[in-house]
Amino acid sequence: MARKLGKRTDQRMAMLRNQVSELLWYGEIETTVDRAKEVRRIDEKLITLAIRTYQDEVTVTKTRTNSKGEKTDVQFVNDGAKKLAARRRLMAELRDLQEMRVEKESKAAYVARIKDVHHPLIEKMFKEYAPKYDARATELGKGGGYTRILRTGTRRGDAAEVCILQLV
């Protein structure tokens, strides 16, 4: 049974969506234990979805004609049907976080670095987390368990039990 966390459904879903996105982007967040358990529930499902579909790619060859009329074949790697459906579901579930400029990075270097990446968090899921946790699953012989909850005590003011939720 899902926890209501003292919020209306739309507010609760927006809060959990934000926290799941922040957890996947930064690797850890600090929150209450009840919220962390709900975030972990959603997060585990999304990572499993990425793991099951990250290798579904299709190579497509297209013929391009340049200004001189010469034809050349160009190969592209596109998402397969399952990976595309998973990408769309992740885009619906997660908030779209943008890549930040690194300190002392010029605007031209920043634009060149993020030119081909339209959804950085989704790309991070497929290129970083999915291979990492897939290798971990084959090594340990089991899936799941991508997050850990470290309890840090109670919060001053309302005495809510606070924890740090981390990706393993």
Image (tube, rainbow, N blue to C red):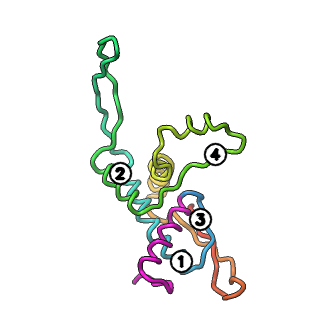
Secondary structure beneath disc 3?
Answer: strand
- Gap between marks 1 and 2 measured at Cα: 28 Å
Q: Position of residue 128 (x, y in %)?
A: 51, 48
Q: Position of residue 51 (x, y in %)?
A: 41, 54
Of badges 4 and 3, nearer the viewer stands 4
Q: Is 77 rendered above or below residue 52?
A: above
Q: Find disc 1 in the rendering and name its residue.
A: 35
For label 1, the crowd category at 10 Å Cα-Cα, with few meaning under 14, some 14 to 19 and many 20 or more, is many
Q: Amino acid at mark 4?
A: Arg
Q: Find disc 4 in the rendering and name its residue.
A: 101
Residue 55 vs residue 147: left or right? left
Q: Amino acid at mark 2?
A: Thr
Q: How many marks?
A: 4
The span picked out in magenta is 1-24
- Gap between marks 1 and 4 measured at Cα: 30 Å
Disc on the earlier residue, 2 or 3:
2
Q: Amino acid at mark 1?
A: Arg
**Which quarter of the image is occupied by the N terminus?**
bottom left
Who's the residue at 30% across and 12% down the image?
70
- Gap between marks 4 and 2 measured at Cα: 30 Å
- Gap between marks 2 and 3 measured at Cα: 23 Å
Secondary structure beneath disc 2?
Answer: helix
Circles 2 and 3: CB atoms closer than 8 Å? no
Q: Find disc 3 in the rendering and name its residue.
A: 166
Secondary structure beneath disc 1?
Answer: helix
Disc on the earlier residue, 4 or 3:
4
Of badges 3 and 1, nearer the viewer stands 1
Disc on the earlier residue, 3 or 1:
1
Q: Find disc 2 in the rendering and name its residue.
A: 53
Who's the residue at 29% across and 51% down the image?
82
Secondary structure beneath disc 4?
Answer: loop
- Quarter-of-image position of residue 8: bottom left
